[in-house]
Amino acid sequence: MDILYFAWVRERIGLPRETIQTEAATVADLVAELCAREDRYAAAFADVTALRVALDQELTGFDAPLAGVREVAFFPPMTGG
Amino acid sequence: MDILYFAWVRERIGLPRETIQTEAATVADLVAELCAREDRYAAAFADVTALRVALDQELTGFDAPLAGVREVAFFPPMTGG
Amino acid sequence: MAVRIQEAAFGAGAELDRFTADAPGAGAVVSFTGVVRDVDGGLRHMLIEHYPGMTERAITALVSEAKARWNLTDALVIHRFGQLAPGDPIMMVATASAHRADAFAAADFLMDYLKSRAPFWKKEVTADGADWVAAKDADEDALSRW
Amino acid sequence: MAVRIQEAAFGAGAELDRFTADAPGAGAVVSFTGVVRDVDGGLRHMLIEHYPGMTERAITALVSEAKARWNLTDALVIHRFGQLAPGDPIMMVATASAHRADAFAAADFLMDYLKSRAPFWKKEVTADGADWVAAKDADEDALSRW
């Protein structure tokens, strides 16, 4: 599964993208798994209410299931326009 | 007093502007006075609900008094923009 | 703030660029351009009559009201009169603000009032003759939004 | 309908003129231009990061929704990414319609959704350092209008 990070999430974790093997059932499970790996993940995901997540390029919630998903992206609220 | 006509009011009356002497107290009185003069005025003012009037370049109603007014303009509803 | 009533053609893009360059700190610029549409049977040209003097007064008053109601750094109104060809810009409104909501609302307001309160009258000339454009009830009704 | 996500600068006026020329019968063209504002302390430049792929998908979906909700003859969205200087256009939306109300509403809608639903992130670089621009509650709240 490809995991992408943008903006300050990318900066805190220190990379823009990585490919991982995971059995996580939901986004929240994946976040818990990443936070357990290293402090930089725990720092980036400290407050998930300040984050947004997209599965295969569609915005969704942290309770969304990961079955069949190829690309997960984490980022702060968007500030385009 | 200067009387100005625009758009189809101008076309029906046949002139863009004229200067008249009048004792009319209100716009409605002036309209009645003009209508009594010639058919082309009566034709132009046949339905005053289809007309607008400005006194000294400010939109107003047909019951407005003419005291102190220098310029009266009659025209159809505006279609700018 | 500028109000220009002119017979000459203008370029909406060039006006927008100049307006934007002169509005430092604005962040949000909204423009409206009204374009002469063709009509059934083919429009030869459009004639726009106006009331010199009152036109400038009425539009300047509208711009002042827009400035009072919204937080604008600048506003521009250009309106042509005389003979226009299909595809020509008839008029343009531009507003600049630190906030997009203000720029949108002020431009929308100015357009609604320009339609029904600025003394312009349009006449469409086709092969079949010439007709004054009738005012629409919807345009008068739109004013109640403000 | 065109959606362009690009690093290169663009000229809002030239884009508006091209868009208007390609929209015969429209009558009403509304544009919004977002411009890089200076900040206290002096902005060196703005950096805009985006999510290639999702950006185009999200904006194309927004434009499709705008077309479904309003009577549009055309719509254009341009959004830059990369390094921008103060005064540079960041992005632009243009809508064309036979009716000004549709053109205004669709442009306003597209801007509200672009602000909060298109995956762009702005960072301001000054002499003091670099800061990510925080999303505003007001921008999220604006979506409830639609």
Image (cartoon, coloured by chain):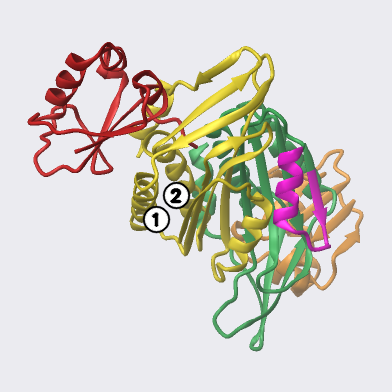
Chain colours: A red, B orange, C green, D yellow
Q: Look at the numbered discs 2 and 1 and tell me whether their residues touch, using CB distance below 8 Å.
A: yes
Q: Quadrant of residue D44?
A: top right
- First to last magenta residue range: C3-21
Q: Label 1, on which residue?
A: D70
Q: Residue at x 45, y 20 (%)?
A: D134
Host chain of mark 2: D
Q: Amino acid at mark 1?
A: Trp
Whole-percent x, y for residue B58 in the image = 75, 43
Q: Residue at x 36, y 27 (%)?
A: A15
Q: Position of residue D36 (x, y in %)?
A: 62, 32
Confirm whether the magenta stretch covers residue C11.
Answer: yes
B10 falls in the magenta region: no
Does the image show residue C10? yes
- The residue at which mark 2 appears reads as D106
Q: CA distance from mark 2 to mark 1?
A: 7 Å
Q: As drawn, is A27 to the left or to the right of C48?
A: left
Residue type of the residue flagged with mark 2: Ala
- The answer to whether residue B79 of the structure is visible from this angle is no
| Residue that appears at 71% across and 45% down | B59
- Where residue D26 appears, as percent x and y from the top left, is 54, 65
* Horizontal side of residue D97 vs B28, given as left or right: left
Q: C145 or B73: which is nearer to us?
A: C145
Front in this rendered view, residue C84 or A59: A59
